[in-house]
Amino acid sequence: MKSIALGLAALLLGTAASHAAEAWKEAEVGGKKIYTDAMGMTLYTYDKDDKGKSNCYDKCAANWPPLKAEAGAKADDEWTIVDRTDGTKMWAYDGKPVYTFVKDKKAGDMAGEGVAGVWHVVKAD
């Protein structure tokens, strides 16, 4: 009975981790290790965000779509979930909300790096 309980616990932990793993992944682009979404699109942070709080809405969010956290998603180490004022949830890395950029057209593009001096690629340490 104990082994069944341990097996079930391992299965549940694996399921929770897979939810997180489906949202982002580590990639190497131009010799740099970065994080991307599941489709390989580069993830960015915004200097005007507060830790654990997004300040990117309306036109900003249209250009910099938040990396949405699906229902049932679970935090995983430095990856956490932030509640947005519009009622949606998004992923954050080390407390900083993360976004994609509409001008990135294919996996590995990093057109958003340094935009207005406030957007930065999320580096995988």
Image (spheres, rainbow, N blue to C red):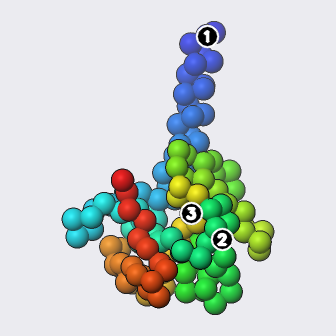
Residue 39 place in picture, x, y as percent: 43, 67
**Which residue was labeled with disc 2?**
54
Q: Pick whichever of labels 2 and 1 is earlier in the sequence.
A: 1
Is residue 47 shown left or right of residue 56? Answer: left
Q: Residues within 10 Å of mark 3 (few under 14, many from 20)?
A: many
Query: In the image, is residue 116 above or below residue 34?
Result: below
Q: CA distance from mark 1 to mark 3?
A: 40 Å
Q: Residues within 10 Å of mark 2 (few under 14, many from 20)?
A: many
User: Depth check: 11 or 119 in front?
Assistant: 119
Disc 2 + disc 1, Cβ < 8 Å: no
Q: Secondary structure at mark 2?
A: loop
Give the mark count: 3
Q: Nearer the viewer, mark 2 or mark 1?
A: 2
Which amino acid, by three-letter code, is at mark 1? Lys
**Which residue was labeled with disc 3?**
96
Is residue 3 shown left or right of residue 84? Answer: left
Which amino acid, by three-letter code, is at mark 2? Ser
Task: Give the residue drawn at x 69%, y 56%.
Answer: 71
Quarter residue 115 falls in: bottom left
Which amino acid, by three-letter code, is at mark 3? Lys
